[in-house]
Image (cartoon, helix red, strand yellow):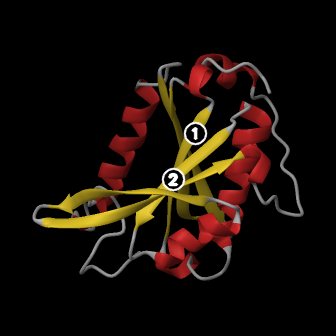
Amino acid sequence: MHDASRTPFGFPWTDAPAEELPRNLAAYQWGLRGRVDPAFWAIVFAVHVDGRVVGSQELSAHDFANRRTVNSGSWLTSSAQGRGLGTEIHAALLLFAFDVLGAEWAESSAAAWNERSLAVSRRRGYRDNGVTRVSPRPGEPVDEQRVRLSKGECRRPSWSIAVRGADRALAQLGVSAA
């Protein structure tokens, strides 16, 4: 997924032995499902290509009903990178956040050195929103570039999304339909 000498993530989850990754990923997903409520929620969408999962796109929020702000993060396998999928899945996520959930702002971040990831956000109109310092691996601090996008400045794709049956999920998230 990335060069093993440095991690692009705020938490080094890909450093685990390969045989542990599936179990760790499943435990993370189930942990998110058990904590969903209006104060904090996270939705993780799988990215499928030719019937195979090649990545994920996560959308989360704290106090969404009042803040109307979502955060996002994603990953793609090496074989899926460089094909425009990151840009497309992020566009779909933003359409869902703005048009279905009623978000007013979207925020994200990436390691400051990870220009490919930051380019995906900038293609949609995100603007730099400060730098913070993270240490995904002990003793290896990294600058993390934050980015922010308003609903009105989102560069929308030429296509649209269709969402069916979202009412129950929105109710669990404490979200009134947009």
Q: Residue at x 80, y 27 (%)?
A: 178
Q: Which quadrant holds residue 13?
A: bottom left
- Quarter of the rendering occupied by the N terminus: bottom left
- Residue 12 x/y as whole percent: 26, 61
59 lies left or right of 146 = right
Residue 102: percent from left, percent from top? 74, 31
Contact between labelled residues 2 and 1, with CB atoms less than 8 Å apart: no
The count of marks equals 2
Residue 175 x/y as whole percent? 67, 21
**Element carrying mark 1:** strand
Q: Residue at x 75, y 22 (%)?
A: 167
Q: Say what secondary structure mark 2 lies in.
A: strand
- Above or below, 53 against 25 in this view is below
Of labels 1 and 2, earlier in sequence is 1
User: Extreme left residue here?
Assistant: 139
Q: Does residue 133 sit above or below 142 in this rendering?
A: above
* 119 lies above or below 177: below
Q: Which mark is residue 149?
A: none
Comparing 72 with 31, the one in front is 72
Question: For the residue marked with disc 2, what is the amino acid?
Answer: Ser
Which residue is labeled 1 in the image?
A: 70
Residue 173 showing in the rendered view: no
**Residue indicated by mark 2:** 108
Look at label 1 and name its amino acid: Val
Asked whether the viewer can see residue 47, the reply is yes
x 56%, y 78%: residue = 81
Judged left or right of residue 174, residue 2 is left
Q: Is residue 160 left or right of residue 100?
A: right
Q: Image quadrant of residue 20?
A: bottom left
Mark 1 Cα shell of 10 Å, populated few (<14), some (14-19), many (≥20) = many
